[in-house]
Image (spheres, grey):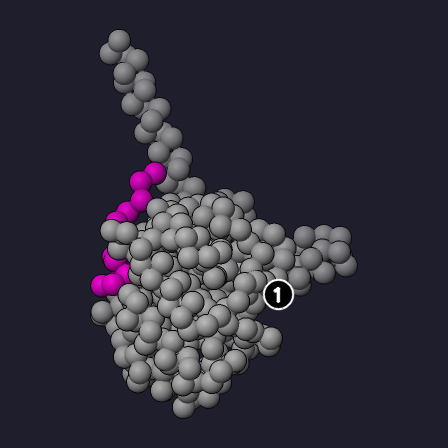
Amino acid sequence: MSKPGSTPLRELLAAGPVLAPACYDGITAAILEQEGFSALGISGAGLAMSLLGVPDLGLLTLTELVTAVRAITARRSVPVLVDADTGFGGTLNVVRTVEELARAGAAAIQLEDQVAPKRCGHLAGKAVVSRAEFVERIVAATVGRGDSDALIVARTDALAAHGLDEALNRGHGAIEAGADLVFVEAPTTVDEVERVGTEFPGRAMYNLATGGRSPALGVDELGELGYALVVCPTVALYPVVSALRDAARSLRRTGTDAHLRSLGMSPAALFDSVHMSAWLELDANIERKANAVTRDV
């Protein structure tokens, strides 16, 4: 099955704020795209939890990340943002990380300034590298993307460790180094959110980390404040974890699948969420062509 052409992320960002919910595997990506979103993110925390059953502590390897990204982007017709954490090592590792992710189909690649191993931006205990080392990572990322159209998103967690002024200075340094977007993680007040948008109008990214440290603002309001890209990393994770826990408890308690039948799902409906009919049609077309060739021989 061929992948339809997608609108480049740069064009989407130029037209207005883009809301990108985060997926973590093929089924979550398919459902989010079917619901009409123009871009998707891939949650690093979601990958760590779904692939390895571990928390967001930088435990995912580059190979695991690239394999997951390739599987997700192969069948998506919308651009996908990938969280590459700290780049999996030193400067040359960052180059290779971005090269591999660009080849895997990433439309945007996010690099951050945390000390490895990193941790979720809305948890305590974060530490960051020097501003010079962060800028070096961004320069390496721009080298790694080569002639691809992948955007580089520069994330800084310096606000929690050194204050907003330092975070903004790092953002400006990242822009000078070639970053396309700046992501100041975990502002805690609306005033901080507004200042980031003012400093980087049309080039700021915001993280709607539900239940985290940042204000819960809507995409339209964030767009008015200067934000170009808004990601929601929890849209797939929270509902899946909550619903699965409830369903498992009901199954264990009752010994029946009555609670699942009430969802109105079936194997056919489940497979339709990943385009079963299109796959069957493809199979039938191949069989018809093969039969035609056989008759002509």
Residue 147 showing in the rendered view: yes
Residue 219 vertical position relative to residue 191 in the rendered view, above or below? above
**Extreme residue toward the top, this view:** 297
- In this rendered view, identify the residue nearer to me: 178 or 270: 178
- Residue 76 in percent (x, y) is at 36, 50
The residue positioned 49% from the left and 50% from the top of the image is 62
Tell me, yes or no, whether the highlighted magenta stretch contains residue 264: no
Tell me, yes or no, whether the highlighted magenta stretch contains residue 5: yes
Left or right? Give the position of 203 relative to 111: left
Write down the region rendered in magenta. Answer: 1-11
- In this rendered view, identify the residue nearer to me: 71 or 91: 91
- Residue 1 in percent (x, y) is at 34, 38
- In this rendered view, identify the residue nearer to me: 282 or 16: 16
Residue 217 showing in the rendered view: no
Task: Answer with the quarter of the image where residue 118 lies.
Answer: bottom right
Q: How many marks?
A: 1
Q: 10 Å neighbourhood of mark 1: few (<14), some, or many (≥20)?
A: few
Residue 192 vertical position relative to residue 255 in the rendered view, above or below? below
Q: Amino acid at mark 1?
A: Ser
**Extreme residue toward the bottom, this view:** 191
Which residue has dot 1 on it?
242
Quadrant in which the C terminus appears:
top left
The residue positioned 30% from the left and 67% from the top of the image is 177
Helix, strand or loop for the magenta stretch, by majority = loop
- Residue 96 in percent (x, y) is at 40, 50
SS assignment at label 1: helix
- Residue 137 in percent (x, y) is at 40, 62
Left or right? Give the position of 284 relative to 28: left
The residue positioned 47% from the left and 62% from the top of the image is 86
Residue 166 vertical position relative to residue 254 in the rendered view, above or below? below
The residue positioned 46% from the left and 72% from the top of the image is 130
